[in-house]
Amino acid sequence: NDGRHAGALAPAGGGRLKLWPSAAATTARALAAGKRPAQLSLFVYESLHKNIDPKQKKSAVEMINAGGLIGWVIVVLGLAALLMILGRVLILGVAAARGRGLADAFESLVRIGRLDEARSAARRAGGSIGRVLRATLDGIELPREQLEDRVSEAMLAEQPRLSRFGAAITVFAAVAPLLGLLGTVTGMISTFDIITEHGTGDPKLLSSGISEALITTELGLIVAIPALLVGTLLGGWSTSIETGIERAALRLVNARCELPEGPPERVAASGSAGEPLGPRLSASAQPAAPEGT
């Protein structure tokens, strides 16, 4: 020993020893000088005939490769879910930002009777709330029942836009753990095939199948848990935005009906429901019989 190399010794196979690549040089030199450190780390091994290599950290790509084809399928699924989540956040964020203050401004115009100005502003407004309020103001002179139907129709047209990607995110969150379970099954089948062919003498032969079984399960849960959580939160946000848009449209309806010259209401028939609704002459309007002379 020339003193340039110091550290812990580990089995190298064939009855030989090798220098373990760890930070033990200071401890080894202290022991060689007759000094005993306060804490001494020991390397315990069974035999010198089996080589022991230090554990190497795996990169993300190596870990996915250990999961096999199903591991990469889960990763692609997770990336697609991430892109859909970002797109859904952008859609809902734009819809929420455009809705701030719009309902109050339009309601103020309707309450003071400036309907034409409100219609012009609604045509310039964009987003889901702008389209719904535009449809409401275009039919603001209709009876209340017809106007509410118009609001409902406009809301139904906007729901697919506000719920875009929501169903796909939920499906991906449900499929990812199932793919992980599939990878677990295929990995265990591969492990049993190796045991049947080579026995259990060398654990390294079994590591590939076990890695595939465990890593695919891990990847499936890594994708499913955040996708399900974020998808549920975005679904609640979408419902809140839809409720706010519908409430804003109904505020315009109520403001118009509170005006003195509100929209005409449906006039109820004076007769019963079973009577014909044709014109009838009143008793005073019927021609009188000629009097005799």
Image: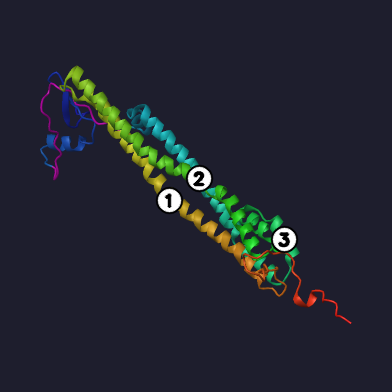
Q: Secondary structure at mark 2?
A: helix
Q: Amino acid at mark 2?
A: Leu
Q: Secondary structure at mark 3?
A: helix
Q: CA distance from mark 1 to mark 2?
A: 14 Å
Q: Amino acid at mark 1?
A: Thr
Residue 247: image location, x then y, percent: 57, 63
Q: Answer few, some or many: residues within 10 Å of disc 3's Cα (few below 14, many 20 plus, some between 14 and 19).
A: many
Residue labelled with disc 1: 232
Residue labelled with disc 3: 119
Residue 23: image location, x then y, percent: 23, 36
What is the image's colouring?
A: rainbow
Magenta stretch, residue numbers? 37-57
Which residue appears farthest toward the front when viewing the image?
293
Nearest to N terminus: mark 1 or mark 3? 3
Residue labelled with disc 2: 86
Quick check: marks 1 and 2 in contact, CB under 8 Å? no
Which residue appears farthest toward the bottom when viewing the image?
293
Q: Answer few, some or many: residues within 10 Å of disc 2's Cα (few below 14, many 20 plus, some between 14 and 19).
A: few
